Amino acid sequence: MNVLVHGACGKMGAEVLKCLAEMQGVTLLCGVDAMKKGDTPFPCYTSFDEVEGVPDVVVDFSFHTLVPSVLEYAVRVGCAAVIATTGLNEAELASVREAAKRIPVFYSANMSVGIALLVDFAKRAAAAFPKADIEIVEAHHNRKVDAPSGTALMLAEGIREVREHATLVTGRHGEGKRTQGEIGIHALRMANIVGEHEVLLTTDTQQLCLKHTAYDRGLFAEGAVKAACFVAGRASGLYNMYDMLYSE
């Protein structure tokens, strides 16, 4: 399997390259990064137009505004795509859904297998405790742009699958009395925290805390490469972590 890494010169791109180097049967076709400066120890270009050959899958760890162009390239050459970039707006998400009509696209707001399990556990807990108050607390490094995190929103939307009428409340100030059916989301930004997500379900008699902590950004690269191996060669459609986890 040949892989093209978009955003190859960034921190997460470097982690993906490291994972690819350690895997058998998976090779790097090239990298693409508009921010490339100088020579690289692997084939790397500043534009998709410079790429020679066709990858089996493109793995994207870049910036959300670039996602439509990544998908446009994948559709044009007919390869699969793994969109690991976070912070997509509605128009960018629409481009993901549109591309999935023509090619296999793997998209997740978080590429961690542990987070996928956390969402699953949170949904089950919310169903088991239908009257529990639910709060989501996420913490990241002080350079993160989007708040709340895409993962926190993914957790909330997962819970809403079993609580259809729940409303999302981001932070609280002023008159902060809780209303029935709220899912509260709170964002913390501190130092170099890679990522922490906690779901608290509290009734009058007990509290259940579900938490995932990321210690190294490499875990997201591992998930993205695993996703690439899963989605390459599949039929067109939109795939996610649950498709990958539970197909196995």
Image: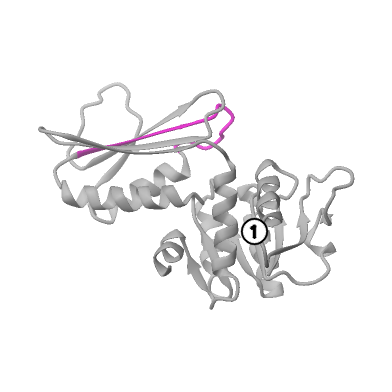
Asked if the stretch drawn in magenta spans residue 72, the answer is no
- Residue 215 in the image: above or below residue 120: above
- Could one spot residue 226 in this view of the protein? yes
- Could one spot residue 159 in this view of the protein? no
Amino acid type shown at disc 1: Val
Asked if the stretch drawn in magenta spans residue 136, the answer is yes
- Residue 65 in the image: above or below residue 188: below
Q: What residue did someone put label 1 on? A: 59
Q: Residue at the top extreme?
A: 174
Q: Residue at the bottom extreme?
A: 235
Q: Residue at point 52% right, 50% down?
A: 89
Q: Residue at the right extreme?
A: 39
Residues 245 and 199: in front is: 245
Image spot of residue 177 (x, y percent) = 21, 27
Image spot of residue 246 (x, y percent) = 39, 65
Left or right: 105 in relation to 31: left
Image spot of residue 25 (x, y percent) = 68, 67
Left or right: 226 in relation to 7: left
Left or right: 87 in relation to 210: right
Q: Residue at the left extreme?
A: 205
Image spot of residue 193 (x, y percent) = 52, 29
* Secondary structure type for disc 1: strand
Residues 224 and 236: in front is: 224
- Range shown magenta: 133-148
